Amino acid sequence: MSIVLGDKEFFPSVPEVSYEGRDSDNPFAFKWYDANKIVAGKPMKDWLRFAGCYWHTFCGQGHDPFGPGTQHFEWNASSNVHKRATDKMDAAFEFFTKMQLPYYCFHDTDLIDEENSSVADFEKKIEFITNYAEKKQSASGVKLLWGTANLFSNPRYMNGAGTNPHFPTLARAGAQLKIAIDATIKLHGENYVFWGGREGYISLLNTNMKQEQDNFAAWLHMAKDYARKNGFEGGFLIEPKPMEPTKHQYDFDTATVAGFLNKYGLADDFKVNIEVNHATLANHTFQHELQVAADNNILGSIDANRGDYQNSWDTDQFPNNIAETTEAMLVFLEAGGLQGGGVNFDAKTRRESTDMEDIFHGHIGGMDTFARSLIIAEKIITESPYSDLRKARYETYQSGKGKEFADGKMSLEKLAQIGSEVGEPEQISGKQELFENIVNQYI
Ligand code: XUL
Ligand code: CO
């Protein structure tokens, strides 16, 4: 990948980041991510399909509920909305190409400032900036992993978009949804994401949950039918999150989403985009969410980040926990990877990280964490007794009466008969500590 600059270089102090190996002391080099290295039969870059995200990296400037942003972005300097958008895109593609990121992701409103535009004006703005994006994509080879609509920031969506109790507001959101789908198709986006920002409730007292969920299913069907009719062959992804900004979000976790997709006949087209910090907010591990998705055949994509064990909000920090990521990569590899998705860094540098270079450090660390964990997980699966030990726990279901039961071919009478003949069953250890030690041995 060669570096693609616009009129000006936004990160002149950072060269192209490449693989130098674990002994390198260069902070702008990968220690583990070696794009073409073969792991479990294919290049790392094809397993991981890393993506940079527009919103945290090029839009959010570090504001929090207690104060404004601290990060100064040179691409915001122009007073002209179109110039600001193309400058931002130049900075973004400079970053993607310097970082060897093959993909990127956006919300419609990340690309260009909305500024209270009418639907027609916003559509024109999106048309302008997606024309520019087409040029940047073809100059660089960077592709769109997914697009989405921001249907949660504008105050009009305070009561939700596809679950809004007021039909005209839902329709206004639908106009924006259509523009975002059109933009994704135009830029050959490989997926389209629905993260239900305010699709939930703050109080059940004023909420008709059944109506809202039925509406949401109708909304998703409509979006899917429209996109398919217009040639979109990619995946639709629901991104589970239990709460924040709403008290209760309908797409609570992967198990909830799987049930919803089956109930409403959406399971053929929709999969999940699993975010690490959303998993932990739901009191699950990242590994748990991946496993539920894999078992339901809906493991679409990943939003990579991490939370903070000492508090419980969505901190969206860059991944750096090798043990956590290794456990996740075990599930990932056993599932055969992602179905059409990639690893998108939905992560932000801290409010106190104010140097332009800091976004490089965050992404280098995140990519190395995933790459290293992938290598470790492959070794655990192929070289250690891990898989055999787990398989052995279930061997009584592989043949004979256990298999008959597991195949659903046994009556309760027969099961009870066997149960009364076996006597007190042998005590069999779960050996969790041994499993944990094997993982640590390979780290
Ligand atoms: C919010 C979040 C979003 C989605 C896209 O928690 O993760 O950025 O990924 O709307
Ligand atoms: Co996300």
Image: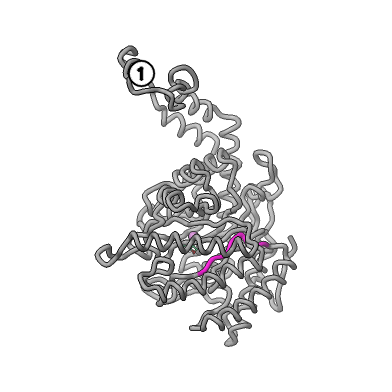
Quadrant containing the C terminus is: top right
Front residue of 287/400: it is: 400
The number of numbered badges drawn on the structure is: 1
Q: Which residues are magenta?
A: 143-149
Name which residue lies at 61% across and 78% down. 85
Q: Is residue 52 visible?
A: no
Residue 165 within the magenta-colored segment of the rendering:
no
Name which residue lies at 58% across and 70% down. 356
Front residue of 296/395: it is: 296
Q: Amino acid at mark 1?
A: Lys
Residue 311 x/y as whole percent:
35, 57
Front residue of 213/51: it is: 213
Residue that carries the numbered disc 1 in the rendered image:
414
Q: Is residue 265 left or right of residue 44?
A: left
Q: Is residue 145 left or right of residue 237?
A: right
Quadrant containing the N terminus is: bottom right
Residue 330 x/y as whole percent:
53, 39
Residue 292 x/y as whole percent:
46, 44
Q: Is mark 1 within 8 Å of ligand 2?
A: no
Residue 298 x/y as whole percent:
52, 47
Tell me if residue 83 comes above or below residue 244 in the rendering: below
